[in-house]
Image (spheres, rainbow, N blue to C red):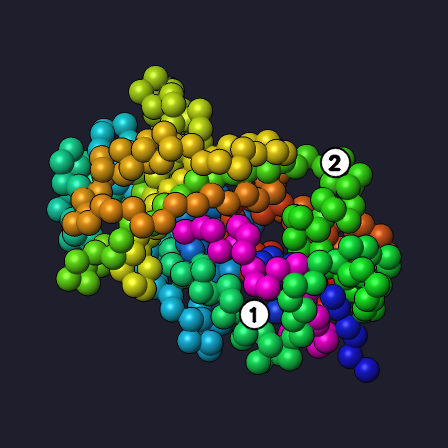
Amino acid sequence: MNKSAIVIGAGIVGLATARALSLRGFKVSVFERNERAVGASIRNFGMVWPIGQPKGQRFDRAMLSRSIWKQICTEAGIWHDEVGSLHIACSDDELEVMNGYVALNSHYRECSLLSPEETLKKSPAVNSENLKGALWSPNEMIVEARVAIGKLAEYLSDKFNVTFHWNTAISSVAGGKVASGKQTWEADEVFICSGAEFETLYPELFRSQAITKCKLQMMRIEAQADNRRIGPALCGSLSMIHYPGFHAVPALKNLRNRYENEYAEYLKWGIHVMAAQNHTGEITIGDSHEYGLVHDPFDKDFINHLILQYLKTFSSFKQHKVVQTWHGIYPKMTNGETELILTAENGVTIINGLGGNGMTLSFGLCEQVIGAMFD
């Protein structure tokens, strides 16, 4: 008889866990406290972002995730766009960091430094003023998270007969038994893949970890006229300060020193600016990073203005009207790790702590974790 597994949380980590278990013959049931996933998994760029990961295990994991995303999107008819990415340099020291990145990484992953002319050929939406060049990577892929997460659940249900229990908040876990009020279910293995459930079901364990929460603010710009596509995802050079994939570049230290003077307010609020276009032509932009266990539920208008102001330094869109604003909150490790794998009790595993890397790392991480447990 096949073993059974319960997965708590229908965000990207829960869905990736359900997939990995299903492939290994488990009968999987997923429990989600809402009628659909409404947390951080749908409140992001929809970027699968290998370039942000340092070479080694995390880059390899990102590329494994990318291959799984592509397979599922192809099978399930989920829109995806393998557009790659451009980090735009508007100064010589930014270009120096990009050149250093290529020198350290070009033997390990596809990337190259483009001239201003080559950059503008890649994207008509790059601001040509002060343009020094760009770092090009072909590996990045865009999905529309608001749609893709729901379709992933449908795909798992159709292909693997995964059972979804929506509007079912789990109130207790004891071994292989989970309860929602007076209702109970049992399975051979239980996986807790939601930050909310981790904190609620195992509060002492949660408090003992090097974990906090991150609030990010994001926006969406209206569809561009004449079905205009911007091509690759676009990033300002502040993103190089944010992503650990760039931290090994020696020239980054001098760039950071300059930014600490010229962009002190941006660094204070963890702002770096990126833009990705979805299938309707809308452009998702952001974001900021505020850290703490409790966050102000109200967004800060000045942060959105800082994001829009910096966006114009490296991009040139025909339409700029903001049609949506929102924020998301996700658990974030404070020790630099991008995952937290814990055995809460016999038969109960917690998979958490991916921070802002959920779309990029979840499929690869869960494939590796579940594989190590059961293969």
User: Can residue 191 be spotted in the picture?
Assistant: yes
Q: Say which residue appears at 51% left-offset and 63% top-offset.
A: 149
Give the Cα distance between marks 2 and 1.
31 Å
Whether 63 is among the magenta residues is no
Residue beneath label 2, please?
Answer: 207
Tag 1: Cα neighbours inside 10 Å, few (<14), some, or many (≥20)? Answer: many
- Which percent across, then down, holds residue 56? 52, 48
In this rendering, would 109 be left or right of 10? left
For mark 1, give the secondary structure: helix
Segment colored magenta: 20-45
Pick whichever, 126 or 92, lies toward us.
Answer: 126
Whether 26 is among the magenta residues is yes
- Which percent across, then down, holds residue 193? 66, 55
Q: Say which residue appears at 82% left-offset and 56% top-offset.
A: 173
> Residue 153: which disc?
1
Question: Which amino acid type is shown beneath numbered disc 1?
Answer: Ala
- Which percent across, then down, holds residue 345? 84, 52
Looking at marks 2 and 1 on the same chain, the residue that comes earlier in the sequence is marked by 1
Q: Say which residue appears at 46% left-offset and 65% top-offset.
A: 148
